[in-house]
Image (cartoon, rainbow, N blue to C red):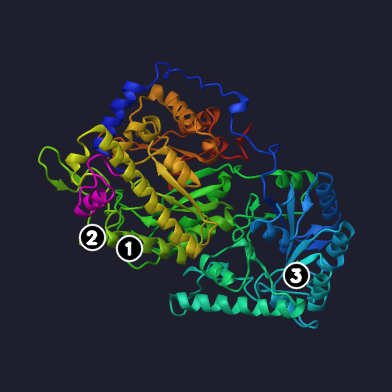
Amino acid sequence: MFVNLTSIRSMASLLCSLLLLSGCSKNIPAFVPPEQRPSHNFNEPWPKNKYLALGYHDVEDSDPDQSFVSVTTERLEEQFSWLRENGYQPITVDQILTASEGGESLPEKAVLLTFDDGYRSFYTRVFPLLKAYNWPAVLAPVGKWVDTPENEKVNFGGQMIERERFLTWDQISEVARSGLVEIGAHTDDLHYGIPGNPQGNLLPAAATRAYDAATGKYETDAQFKTRIAEDVKRITAKITRVTGKKPRVWVWPYGAANGEALKIVQDHGYSLILSLDSGLGSIDNLIDTPRVLVSNDPQLRNFANVSTVMENNEVMRVAHVDLDYVYDADPEQMDRNLGDLVQRIADMKITTVFLQAYADPTGDGLVKSVYFPNRHLPVRADLFSRAAWQLKSRAFVNVYAWMPVLSYDLAASIPRVTSWNPDTGETAVDKNQYQRLSPFDPVARQQITEMYEDLAKHSSFSGILFHDDAILSDFEDAGPQALAAYRAAGLPGSIKELRADPDTMQRWTRYKSQYLVDFTKELTEHVHAIRGPQIKTARNIFAEPILHPESEAWYAQNLDDFLAAYDWTAPMAMPWMENVPADEADAWLDTLVSTVGTRPGALNKTVFEIQGRDWRPSKGQEDSGHIDSALMARWLKRLQLSGARSFGYYPDDFTKNQPELDVIRPAISNAWYPFHD
């Protein structure tokens, strides 16, 4: 929901008209030479002190059962041979820790072999292979499964499995004594799902506050931490007793990390902590080591593809979704709505959903209620957790929680952003802008931070998308606390003086831009502390500060700041929102992409969002309705032809099939319109 920012729009439209290149009406995208295009990095030199971690599970002679993420013995042998023939060098945990402490560097093409859960196939099939190659590996069993007596079945996350599929402690002791195998911990008894919301979704027990349907309450902070700490204590003692060594490697069940649990794990002496994600591990970040999951018994070509992928290679395809479309006062209808959304996203075959975590049914951008339990605003419905989990587990997409930065309708006593009127000399809230809390007020900052904390405690997601409401115009913020902050930074203490000359105006603009970035960084730190360091960040940026850097004064947004601060920068590539003439829209999109592309590597971490709705008034209506799906598809293809790797659109209206699925899917899905180098 993008507010009509009247004063900014008029100036932006004027600049757009004056500064668009004379050739902007041509309908031919600029040719980008191959060497200048963003590309995969298969052939780049292996980065120093980085390593590839591979995550294996069970190994079977035939018919690999994906309930246990199995590979066949034949494929495992084939993969080991390929790794050796292509120069990969398996490394030990000691080598990683030594390098992290400034000792000998890791070898090129370092690979960490890991095996989860504690299957007996490690002893019968993997261990002989490791000895033949003289290769090290990490084995991370689940304590409770190994504890199961030989005459009983193992409770494998609610499924009763024959005991002979799992290792014994004697076998674990034997492989540990070999010197080739490091024994890590995969929890004692947290490898299962627990109810994580009122709708009963089962979420990873090690990363989730349990919801008790009988009481209608979530696990408290103290209860959650005690449960995790007791589990860590038990598995640590078991491994120490069996191996004679305190374990150093922690492996998250399902790859699902949690910041509070992470601190407990670290307090118990674990120094290398593994998840399941793409990319290379680094000696500079041992507490969030990604691993490539080896699943579905991959053929050698597929295995080779994932083994050669390094950083900066993610391609994002995004549908930006209002949860307001899902909400209904009838819980059964709401659940049907959610099912329709999940099916649509699954059919679209995209990678990511930017999912609204707050409610804004009137579309004015002022948040009066949200979709998760919290300390400060009404809960319209405890819906975000379920929607995010359903999208992740059924549509197989990453979910970013879309949250405002400042536009919350909290207590009237909390100062709002005010604007100085040069004609009257008075300050007041600008009704044509987002109604925002002042970021310079400590109470506002604290309560906004607590909103983010409560979101992190009560839901599982992959990232945070900071909304476009984090703006300050060239007359804002004019409140007393803001003016005091300017003075403390060595700037004049009145808006009139701040605007008196270009140099002071520029210093003030840069101060506000960085101040907002720093506040979002603080919010991220609090989310990381609760949800875990794996949570990514993205932030929406208006197009004008990209195309015309001088317009930073009207927004307090700066492209280079964003590229440095966030995992993803999300420009609003919305020509009609910027009043670009229809016959100039293609050239405008080309220019937007090429401008971002002038920054080295920027296109690898930028996701362009086109508009799916025309917010300009029409025929007495508040807006002009949905944009033609074919036009949206053409815009997306235009972005890609111009050099964009990642892109998406806002909003997705699944209730009206807008944009039309069969039209938009070939343009947005890698499965239908793949990226080509």
Drawn side of residue 115 relative to residue 269, left or right: right
The percent position of residue 52, horizontal first and vertical second, equals 70, 51
Asked whether residue 611 is in view, the answer is no
Query: Which residue in the protein does label 3 denote?
Result: 118
Q: Where in the figure is residue 210, as x and y percent of width and height?
A: 51, 73
Residue 60 percent location from the top left of the image: 83, 62
Q: Quadrant of residue 579?
A: top left
Left or right of residue 649: residue 172: right
Q: What residue is shown at x 32% (from left), y 64% (from top)?
A: 377
Q: Which residue is mark 1?
A: 447
Q: CA distance from mark 2 to mark 1?
A: 10 Å
Q: Residue 371's quadrant in the figure? A: bottom left
Whichever of callouts 3 and 2 sits on the residue coming sooner in the sequence is 3
Question: Which contiguous range is marked in magenta?
Answer: 472-491
Distance Cα–Cα, label 3 vs label 1: 44 Å
Which quadrant is the C terminus positioned in? top right
The answer to whether 350 is drawn above or below residue 201 in the figure is: above
Rendered residue at 44%/30% (across/down): 592
Q: What amino acid type should be assigned to the residue bearing mark 3?
A: Gly
Q: Residue furthest right?
A: 132
Residue 158 position (above or below residue 280): below
Above or below: residue 589 compared with residue 225: above
Instruction: Indicate which disc, 2 or 1, sits on the residue closer to the N terminus.
Output: 2
Q: Residues within 10 Å of mark 3 (few under 14, many from 20)?
A: many
* Helix, strand or loop at mark 1: helix
Residue under numbered circle 2: 414
Count of numbered circles on the image: 3
Q: Secondary structure at mark 2?
A: loop
